[in-house]
Amino acid sequence: MIALIRSEWLKLRTVRSNITMTCFAVALPLAITLLTMAFIGVDSVDDATVSAVLLGSGSLSVLLFGIIGVLAITQEYSQGTIRLTLAANPRRTRVFIAKAIVLSLLSAGLTAVIVLVGNTAGEAILDSRGAVGKLANGDMGQAYLGLIALSVVVSLLGMAIGTLTRNPPSAVTILVLWPLLLESLIGGLLSIAISDEIFKWMPFQTGLNALLLEDSNMDFGRWGSVGYFGLWVLALSLFAHTVFKRRDA
Amino acid sequence: MITVEGLTKKYGSTTAVDSLSFTVTPGRVTGFLGPNGSGKSTSMRCMIGLDRVQSGTALFDGKSYRELKKPLHEVGALLDAGNAHSGRTARNHLRWLAMSNGMSPKRVDEVLELVGLTDVAKKRVGQFSLGMKQRLGIASVMLGDPKVVILDEPANGLDPEGIRWIREMLKHLASQGRSVLVSSHLLSEMALMADDLIVIGKGRLITECTVPDFIDRYAKKWVVVKSPQLDSLVSAAQSQGMHVSLGQDVAEFHGVAAATIGELAAKNNVVLHELSTQTGSLEDAFLEVTADAVQYHGNSEAQSKGVAS
């Protein structure tokens, strides 16, 4: 299994588009956070400013990790390497798990880097500009962990969608439209038909709650929200795995 | 040793491979021959577990492909040399493959050397010519030093030099005692590289024999005669019910041996200027055999028709 994980890791890091996408995922929230900290009016800063900006921009990289998840599997289909992969490793479940592990480690690790660097550097910039008020909010660390968890879940979501469609553009489209359009649309229609309560059952929106600074604003709590979203992704992944296992390569 | 038995693959109501059985013996190059769409590639995909079969088995030294823990060490298969990410370097392409079966990067450099790609190992596969991709494909096959080698149309699109390289490589691999199965839709190609033939049409086995046997059984033979007294020879032959076609001062006698015609000429006091046996090209034989497969939906019928002609 270790050999398979190393093989999948090598595959992921030897394609330029994956590297580009990963660089974007890391650089984007850092750039937004640091630039904001450099130009924001010092008077308007409070102890949650860095976290709020970092978490907001971090949700962009969450989506980018989802796209990396899509690419990790769809480029195997579009380039035909899936046949080599499966011929070299006929036990497909292991291939699927190895890919999922590599994606999880990558998105968790890099999101941790984003959080650490963004928070430290953001504070340092504010500090050097003489802003008062340090970050003492207890929920902040929890929200950062939420961001890391969300990156992992969304990258796996991307992989599941990619496994099902096998086609990069359609998988990316579904991944992006899911939170932006699908959930608002379905939620909106159902909320008219049934009740406003329906919005809290929308998986992606609920998962995004994990990024809120105040735990008390959430219906399921921070980890309940991530867990609920995670269950949806787990179910989709299990379905994608079954298809992956049975399908002609 | 590959043993395929009753392999059947259906897509909906179409049967792509129909209870196909054959064996591939070690130390020989076995040509897997059939027209386009006859099920060669599908059979190969089914053999190595990429496609699910409805029934039948393909065993490699008694084990099914999915039972192989590190299959690259047992079976090297090249289905399509294009199955490589165009953005990866040749070396990285082989490295991930080697790594997944627990092989060292050193082995990658060895096979690159073997196929002569060492100098371009750090180039992207997308910049490779078809011939170079084919070589890279052979390198991936050789990674695990497998006992069984399966190649799908390896000579497709190659220039004569590339074809020759593939041919020599396959013969070399077989001479080392490996079982080599190589598909093609061109018989002329197979005649040069294969020892044994498996011919399929419409997913069914038409015949399984050695290349010389195939020519013997299926290639058309006729006797060409030149003579100043052609007319009397032809009428003598026709009176015996032989099938004769006439050209300009040449006659072709079908379905008889040269000796028979010689004796007939002597009996009739006919002077011969030429008496020779002609054999139809392998290509013609192949076309005839596979045309039968399309015409008749049972391989026994197809065979008897083929033998009779």
Image: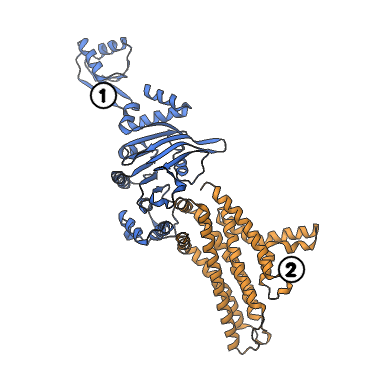
Q: Quadrant of the C terminus of chain B?
A: top left
Label 1 neighbourhood size at 10 Å, few (<14), some (14-19), many (20+)?
some
State the hue of chain A.
orange
Residue A17: x %, y % from top left: 50, 63
Q: Where is mark 1, residue-wise?
A: B277
Mark 1 element type: strand
Relative to B239, is A194 above or below?
below
| Foreground label between 2 and 1 | 2
Q: Report if residue B34 is visible in the image.
A: no
Query: Mark 2, residues whose alpha carbon is within 10 Å: few (<14), some, or many (≥20)?
Result: few
Residue A217 at x, y percent in the picture: 73, 72
Tell me which corner region of the image, top left, top right, bottom left or bottom right, holds residue B186.
Answer: top left
Colour in which chain B is drawn: blue
x and y percentages locating residue B267 in the rendered image: 21, 10
Kindly identify which residue carries mark 2: A219
> What's the residue at 74%, 63% (across, down)?
A199
Q: Is residue A104 left or right of residue B296?
A: right
For the residue marked with disc 1, what is the amino acid? Thr
